[in-house]
Image (cartoon, rainbow, N blue to C red):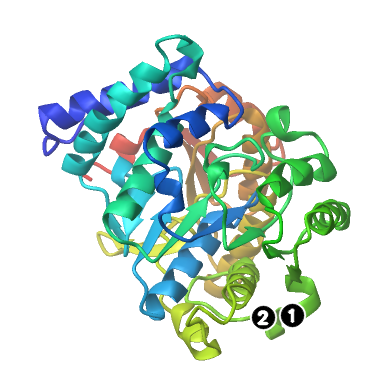
Amino acid sequence: MIPSTLSPEYIAVQDYLFSLKARGLKFGIDRMRGLVEALGHPERAVPVVHITGTNGKGSTAAMMDAIARQAGYRVGLYTSPHLVRLGERVQVDRTPLTDDEIVAFTRQLRPVAEALARTAPDDHPSFFEFMTAMAFLQFQRRGCQLSVIEVGLGGRLDATNVVDPEVSAITSISLDHCEMLGHTPEQIAMEKSGIIKPGKPVVLGRLPPGAERVARAIARERGCQVYSVREVFGEDIACYPTTNLEGDYQRWNAATATLMARAMGPGWAFSSETVTAGLQKVSWPGRWQRVSLSGRPLILDASHNPEGADVLRSNLERLVGTTGKRPVVITGALGAARAGALLTTIADFAKEIHLVVPHQARACSYEELEALIPRSYSGRVVRATLEELFPDR
């Protein structure tokens, strides 16, 4: 249901943008290069840090944003997907694009896109390319001093890879989107390492050994200095920077963000005190986020792949150990490969599992979700909808 606060004009623009998804996914950045060239290269107007990874890239981007704002910079932040409103993807000093701005940018971009597609229909920019262009234009228009850009998918062929960053980072490597990125950590690392640019420093998070070897080899070929989380902070989590976000994995991400700030060089005002203070002010909803609903505690978490399921297991284990209670879990997923790992983990800790089907084309059905719950699970399993579970919310 569309909220009544949305104007008819915005609804029409949103429908148009979402209709671009129906054109399908066309890997490659030539189309994006054509779009930014037609727009006068707004991606060059603001210094960039560029972040990829299977997991942790959004949290690390939010941390880098918090550090840079703590240092006094005006910061553009581009992430995906959004949680509630489309404008969340493009933020300046954590203020999202307004509906009116999305309408205005679409008016600006649509004729450019149609002109690019006039001779070759496949050259029409995609939904993600529209949003990426909006980010570049907004950061230029608002006079940002730094932009923090999260890769959408992969790296080498992602639309964001038209930037020439001050520093690049690879937060983690695990098996996800294998049909597009490869079926081994090394193959996926090859794709994600595509954001490494000649002569520019690169930060490596906690990568599997084979994946790290691939990333280091590419960095060496391109003459890049490598900053490694493991080399600097070791294996003991107690030695890692702290942050206001929960979970040991967030301390891994905090280490990645810390090294990114260090790699920016002497021309940037990123003192150790600034980094430490910024990491205590990170806002990143939906990552083991504790809220209260009608006086009852609710935890929101966006774990969505096997590596994320490992982190979820640690968090659930700690929750049950701390509270002495097994939680009621509400869950849905996009794709059986993701759902299997999540449901196996959830079944080990949940008192009840309430299954929901997201309003997405790739969403698992009730039947698919039920088939993935281990037979050993003895708790209650319920088919539900968010409307039933959270009426009037």
Q: Amino acid at mark 1?
A: Phe
Q: Amino acid at mark 2?
A: Tyr
Question: Which quarter of the rendered picture does the N terminus lie within?
Answer: top left
Task: Characterize the local packing of mark 1: few (<14), some (14-19) or many (20 or more) Cα atoms within 10 angstroms.
Answer: some
Residue 172, given in percent of the width and then of the height, sits at: 70, 56
For residue 226, say whether it is visible.
Answer: yes
Residue 229 shown left or right of residue 336 in the figure? right
Which callout, 2 or 1, points at the residue further toward the start of the chain?
1
Residue 186 shown left or right of residue 286 in the figure? right
Q: Which of the pair 380/58 is nearer the observer?
A: 58
Tell me if residue 243 comes above or below residue 293 in the rendering: below
Dot label at residue 164: none
Circle 2 — which element?
loop
Residue 205, picture quadrant: bottom right
Reading the image, the residue beneath label 2 is 240
Residue 182, given in percent of the width and then of the height, sits at: 77, 34
Residue 341, given in percent of the width and then of the height, sits at: 68, 42
Circle 1 — which element?
helix
Task: Characterize the local packing of mark 2: few (<14), some (14-19) or many (20 or more) Cα atoms within 10 angstroms.
Answer: many
Residue 149, given in percent of the width and then of the height, sits at: 49, 53
Residue located at (53% from left, 43% from top)? 160
Tell me if residue 380 comes above or below residue 311 in the rendering: above
Question: Which quarter of the rendered picture does the C terminus lie within?
Answer: top left
Tell me if residue 358 comes above or below residue 308 in the rendering: above
Reading the image, the residue beneath label 1 is 233
Q: Which of the pair 235/47 is nearer the observer?
A: 47
Residue located at (47% from left, 85% from top)? 274
Residue located at (63% from left, 66% from top)? 249
Residue 107, picture quadrant: top left
Residue 255, picture quadrant: bottom right
- Labelled pair 2, 1 in contact (Cβ < 8 Å): yes
For residue 1, say whether it is visible.
Answer: no
